[in-house]
Image: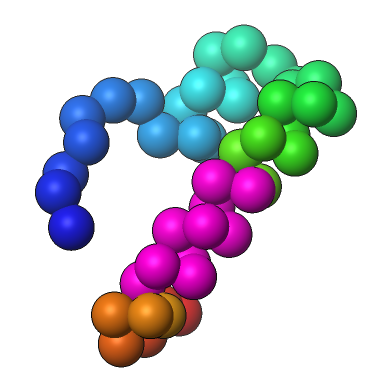
Amino acid sequence: MEFVPGEDLKSSLIRMGPLSAAKAIFIAKQVCEGMVEAHGLGVVHR
C-alpha cells in the first residue's frame, strides 16, 4: 500500500473541531473500505 502524505484524523479534529454527521460518515466509510481491502490481501490490523 502506498503512503499518502497529509494530516491525520486526530490532528484534523484538534484543528477544526467536531465533524458534521455527513463528514463523519464519509470518513467511516473510507476506513471500512480500507479495512475490507486490507483483509482481502491477508493483512491483519489491530
Residue reaching furthest to the right: 21
Q: Quadrant of residue 19?
A: top right
Q: Is residue 22 left or right of residue 35?
A: right
Q: Quadrant of residue 6?
A: top left
Residue 43 at least partly seen: no
Magenta stretch containing residue 33, yes or no?
yes
Q: In which quadrant will I find the C terminus?
A: bottom left
Q: Residue at point 58% right, 22% down?
A: 14
Residue 10 picture location, percent across and down:
52, 35
Depth check, front residue: 13 or 39: 39
Residue 10 at least partly seen: yes
Residue 45 picture location, percent across and down:
40, 78
- Magenta region: which residues? 29-38
Depth check, front residue: 12 or 41: 41
Q: In which quadrant will I find the N terminus?
A: bottom left
Residue 12 picture location, percent across and down:
51, 22
Q: Is residue 30 left or right of residue 8?
A: right
Magenta stretch containing residue 37, yes or no?
yes
Q: Residue at point 16% right, 44% down?
A: 3
